[in-house]
Amino acid sequence: MNFIVEAFILLITSVVLLRFTGKKSVAKMTNLETVIILAIGTTMGHAIKEHKFWQVILILIFFGLFLVIFQKIQMKSSKIERYMTGEATLVINNGKFIMENLRKLRMSEGQLEMRLRQKGISYVSDVKIGTIELDGEFGYELMPHAKPITQEQLLQILGKQESEGRTEAKGENIFEQVVKNNK
């Protein structure tokens, strides 16, 4: 009966740790987060097998704290974040595939075209900037001719809104940073 109580405490501890370390689905996790999750599962298995209950609880807490501390360090240091977590990879620039980066990602043109179709993009030439993000998702900025019209633009066309200075207030284009980092 004691092992049932221990198993229950292990499960509760693991759920609390996972809740504490962040809300991401497995597909959205960084490499470190994935390793920590696997380590938690493996450690739980060893606890059940070897009956070292309190030692395993301490190890699980250490894993969770390590992850949280590491995430906080990454937030304060962009160099550590870039080297440990990585950064988005530029795969399309001005409507053209960047084959060298696709090879680095071990991704074929067909696989990238599938992601384009899933985003409702019919032509590679319509994509100004395309990136594969850290979580494997495809991010993109469309060429001016392919962008849908915004409500702000529509109101401008209809002459119902002044937007002088609006583009300056938006700040730097987030895709431009990816382009700079991939040069």
Image: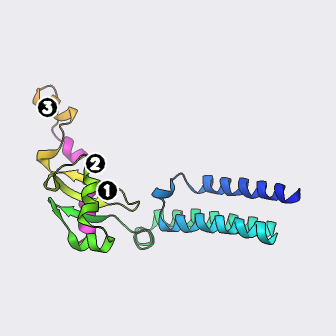
The answer to whether residue 131 is magenta is no
Q: Give me the C-alpha separation between circle 2 and circle 3.
A: 28 Å
User: Residue 19 or 177: which is nearer the viewer?
Assistant: 19
Location of mark 1 (residue): 138
Q: Residue drawn at (58%, 57%), measured in percent from left and top? A: 21
The residue stretch that appears in magenta: 164-182
**Marks 2,1: beta carbons within 8 A:** yes
> Hey, what amino acid is under mark 1?
Phe
Amino acid, disc 3: Gln
Q: Is residue 146 left or right of residue 26?
A: left
Q: Residue 13 occupies which quadrant of the picture?
A: bottom right
Q: Is mark 3 on a helix, strand or loop?
A: helix
Q: What residue type is labelled 2?
A: Lys
Q: At which x and y percent is residue 183?
A: 22, 72
Tag of residue 113: none
Where in the figure is residue 146, as x and y percent of width and height?
A: 14, 45
Q: Which of marks 2 and 1 is nearer the N terminus?
A: 2
Q: Going 71% across and 65% down the picture, which residue do you hit?
A: 44
Between 146 and 87, the one nearer to me in the picture? 146
